[in-house]
Image (spheres, rainbow, N blue to C red):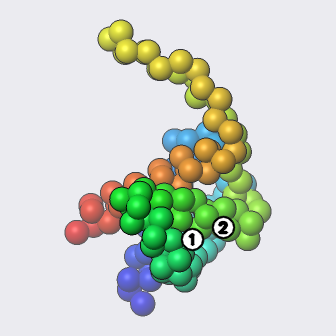
Amino acid sequence: MKSLLRSAATNTASLYITAGVLPSLSVKGGILTFLIGGVALMLLTLVLKPILSVLSFPLNFITLGLFSVLTNTIILYILTLFITEITIHAFAFQGFAFAGFIIPKIYINTFFAYVITSAAISTIVGGIIWLMR
C-alpha cells in the first residue's frame, strides 16, 4: 500500500513538473486532475507496462532499449484517451543559442510531442525515485 501511494505521488509530481516545463502538456481542472492523472498513470504503468515490455522485447533487444521510450509513449497516449483534461499537442521550440552553438526554431508535431513528453515524465519519475532513496 505504501509503495502504491509513493508511486501515485511520484507520478502526480512528474505530471505537475512536466506541465510546468513543457508547452506540449496542458492539464485543465487544477490539482484534482493532476491527482487523478497521477493515479491513472500509476495504474497504467503497473498493468500495461509489463505486457507491452514482453510484446516489444524483440524490438527492445534490437534497438538496445530505445524502444522502451515508445512503450512509455503508448502508455501516455492511453492516459490522454482516458482523462480528457490532460492533452498533448504540437508546439514550436523557439530555438537556443549559447557560445556560438545555435539550435534553430523547430516545429514539433503531435507524435514527437508525445515522445518528448513521455521521455520527460520518465526522466522526472526516475529523478524523484533517486532522490527518495
Compared to residue 114, the image places residue 70 above or below, namely below
Which one is nearer the viewer's eye here, 45 or 34?
45
Compared to residue 33, the image places residue 92 above or below, namely above
Label 1: how many residues lie within 10 Å, few (<14), some (14-19) or many (20+)?
A: many
Q: x%, y% of residue 36?
A: 63, 71
Q: Is residue 106 visible?
A: yes
Q: Quadrant of the N terminus?
A: bottom left
Identify which residue is drawn at 60% across, 26% down. Answer: 106
Q: Is residue 12 visible?
A: no
Compared to residue 110, the image places residue 71 above or below, namely below
Asked if labels 2 and 1 touch by Cβ distance under 8 angstroms, the answer is yes
Tell which circle, 1 or 2, labels the residue nearer the N-terminal end: 1
User: Can you identify the residue that label 1 sits on?
Assistant: 41
Q: x%, y% of residue 18?
A: 52, 50
Say the numbered circle drawn on residue 79: 2
Q: x%, y% of residue 22?
A: 56, 41
Q: Is residue 49 left or right of residue 23?
A: left
Identify which residue is drawn at 32% across, 66% down. Answer: 129
Which one is nearer the viewer's eye here, 36 or 122?
122
Q: Residue furthest left?
A: 133
Which one is nearer the viewer's eye here, 82 or 103?
103
Q: Residue furthest top?
A: 100
Which amino acid lies under the numbered mark 2 shown in the image of this protein? Leu
Q: Quadrant of the C terminus?
A: bottom left
Identify which residue is drawn at 41% across, 61% down. Answer: 62
SS for dot 1: helix
Q: x%, y% of residue 114?
A: 61, 51
Label 2: how many residues lie within 10 Å, few (<14), some (14-19) or many (20+)?
A: many
Which amino acid lies under the numbered mark 1 shown in the image of this protein? Leu
Q: Is residue 96 left or right of residue 80?
A: left
Say the numbered circle drawn on residue 104: none
Identify which residue is drawn at 62% across, 45% down. Answer: 113
